[in-house]
Amino acid sequence: MSDQKNNDSNHLGMNDEEMVELHAKLNKEKHPPTQGFLIAPLIFVFVFGCLIFVCSIQLAHSTNGFQVHPPQEVVELSDEEKEVLRLERKIDSGKKLYAVNCASCHQPSGLGLGEQYPPLAGSEWVSANPELIIKVILKGLVGEIKVKGKTYNPVGGMAAVTNLKSDREIANVTTYVRQAWGNEAPEVSVEEVAQARAESAEQKDQWVGDALQSLYLNNSSE
Ligand code: HEC
């Protein structure tokens, strides 16, 4: 009891030195020494720093200097690859034009239909001098013709395909037809179409089957 009293009086009567010492002691209990632990976060900071650094370099590299819409990696195509790509596009376009302008009669399969519409697949008309197919499209065709040994002479023949306005469209569709369904004729150029168009600028009538046949197809009499 007297001890307690003594303590109390000690507490109250603490001098500065004792007070500081007590606070230091309390502080130590509250905040245990961190010396040993201080190194761990530093290592984390360092590792993450390195990681962010490396990632940034990678990101800057792959986005071409942090552009939001980095340009597609420019792949240098060889001339040969460019050529293949150009022809692919031309034929793609030709295929669409064919579907709209020709397939209703000659069919998507290129096999034609009955006695009325002759086939384009395997047709000697298609694979001959490209002037022939260009002329047929530009002016139409009438009269008896022979395709793959079979005779066709539908009433009215084929009207000019006036929906195909540009030389490029005709070059595309004829190139497609000449290379589809196993046909293997060379592509048709815009210049060839332009020339055929110029030559027949004055012509109003459809081509007559006989005339074209004897001009372009040697085997017409077979
Ligand atoms: C409205 C129907 C019709 C459309 C559309 C049509 N043709 Fe024809 N085509 C014919 C007919 C009919 C003949 C046969 C004409 C004849 O006997 O004189 C023919 C003949 C041909 C021939 C020569 C014969 C052969 O089979 O090789 C070619 C080539 C040809 N067409 C290509 C085309 C192309 C390419 C298109 C589209 C750009 C097209 N035609 C659109 C009806 C059509």
Image (cartoon, rainbow, N blue to C red):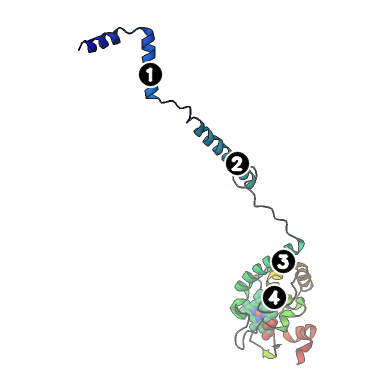
Counting residues from the start of the chain, the first of labels 2 and 1 encountered is: 1
Mark whose residue sits in front, 3 or 4:
3
Q: Quadrant of ligand 1?
A: bottom right
Quadrant including the N terminus: top left
Residue bearing mark 3: 84
Give the farthest residue toward the left: 1
Q: Residue at x 70, y 83 (%)?
A: 123
Q: Quadrant of residue 80?
A: bottom right
Of 189 and 143, nearer the camera is: 189
Q: Are marks 3 and 1 in contact (CB under 8 Å)?
A: no
Mark whose residue sits in front, 2 or 4:
2
Instruction: Determine the secondary structure under disc 1.
Output: helix
Counting residues from the start of the chain, the first of labels 2 and 3 encountered is: 2
Q: Are marks 3 and 4 in contact (CB under 8 Å)?
A: no
Counting residues from the start of the chain, the first of labels 3 and 1 encountered is: 1
Counting residues from the start of the chain, the first of labels 2 and 4 encountered is: 2
**Residue 179 tag number:** 4
Residue bearing mark 1: 25
Picture layout, residue 111 above or below residue 83 = below
Disc 3 from disc 1: Cα separation: 85 Å
In the shown orientation, is residue 8 left or right of residue 127? left
